[in-house]
Amino acid sequence: MDFTISPRIEDFRRRIADFVETRLLPLEADPAAYDAHENIAPDHLERLRAEARAEGLWCLQLSPEHGGQGLSRVGMAVCYEEMNRSIFGPVVFNSAAPDDGNMMVLQALGTEAQKAEFLQPIADGCVRSAFAMTEPDPGSGSDPGMMLTRATRDGDDYVIHGRKWFITGAGVAEHFLLVARTSDDPRRGHTCFLFHRDDPGWSLGRRIPIMGPEEHGGHCEMTFDGLRIPSRNVLYREGHGLKVVQTRLGIARLTHCMRWLGLSKRCVALATEYAARRQGFGVRLADRESVQVLLGGLAADIEIGRLLVMKAAWALDQGGFAKKEISMAKIHVAGLVNRAADTAIQINGARGYSRDTVAEWIYRYARQARLVDGADEVHKMVLNGLLAEEAHRFWSWDVAAEPAQ
């Protein structure tokens, strides 16, 4: 792959960087800018979203047909990393989970009618969305084969019974993607459905308290007790729900990594800025070998993460699935953002542990990275399976075609 980016992508990156630097980072220091769940308050969000849209920085991941800029996966990697130098960044540019992944899978697999009804309002910023898949024990987590939520055909409708939990954004979502079991077939037994918040036959349970700050809408429980969904709202095809899941989660895992790289770089900035001016026992922190080792190691780990993400993004742009590359990136970058936040706090000392910087916010937020969209151990199992299958070919290079004679 070629690591140069186009002038167009660089223009987006530069303008995003300026927006983050001048409008988002100063806002983080204002306690009034936060809502009750430690995210950006709705009034600030609405204003900044309007500004991002006016400057052509809105929904970069979607096609122009849906109000986006049609960026490649490589372009997204560059821009998402820049966005998440601020903890407010992704949601301001309409590139935050779960809306980000939901919009991309709807664009890829939805019918024209489904795109008009379910995708476009999310893309326009009029509604928020959620992806309902995870279930409480003994239901499905990383293993969809354990799914208990059922969709039973009744005429032209499907009737849903079951429970979901830890559904990100469900507290404010109006549009939902729901995965339910339609048969016991291990490969063709799941179907993805679309429904609206106001549809009867389901209820929103508690907003589950979590360790860190929350996305808008929290992480909620949902109960389905006879929700009727018309067959026109099946996303893709009945029995092909795992295809929808794979289409959505592959890129969603990678966009998480793109954003976490931005947070990791922010942590380095918090650490280096303080180390450069803080003195103890007559020596700046930045001149201490122990601090240099911490920051130098972190700088190398961030660059490794960027290369893993870029390789995966490039593979997706070439039409590949990048299963191996995405799992590698997810493992590395999820651990990286945790180490970066810990390092920022350690170097800042009590200041880092306080709320005078966003280091402690990132620290609490980062712990979920090693769990969401597949725990570290699941991705390592995936890689081990590929290693067993491919042996020494696991590390092979792509070979260019011979030039035409």
Image (cartoon, rainbow, N blue to C red):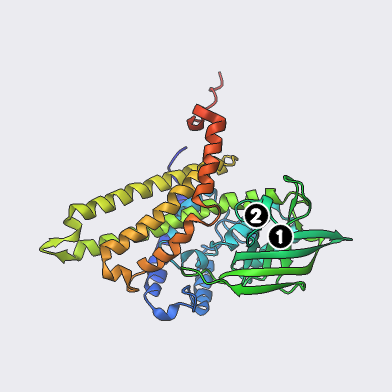
Q: Could you say whether the residue bearing mark 1 is in a helix, strand or loop?
A: helix
Front disc: 1 or 2: 2
Q: Quadrant of residue 260?
A: bottom left
Going by the picture, which residue comes out furthest to the right? Answer: 155
Indicate which disc, 1 or 2, sits on the residue closer to the N terminus.
2
Please provide percent x and percent y for residue 371. 51, 56
Please provide percent x and percent y for residue 42. 53, 77
The amino acid at mark 1 is Lys
Residue in view at x 26 percent, y 66 percent = 349
Q: Is residue 329 above or below residue 53?
A: above
Residue in view at x 40 percent, y 57 percent = 338
State the residue in front, 276 or 390: 390
Going by the picture, which residue comes out furthest to the front? Answer: 138
Residue where numbered disc 2 is placed: 105
Crowd rating for badge 2 (residues with CA inside 10 Å; few <14, some 14–19, many 20+): many
Q: Are marks 1 and 2 in contact (CB under 8 Å)?
A: no
Q: Could you say whether the residue bearing mark 2 is in a helix, strand or loop?
A: helix
Q: Is residue 146 above or below residue 279?
A: above
Residue where numbered disc 1 is placed: 115
The image quadrant where one finds the C terminus is top right
In the picture provided, is 13 more to the left or to the right than 271? Answer: right
State the residue in front, 286 or 44: 286
In the picture provided, is 170 more to the left or to the right than 261? Answer: right
The amino acid at mark 2 is Val
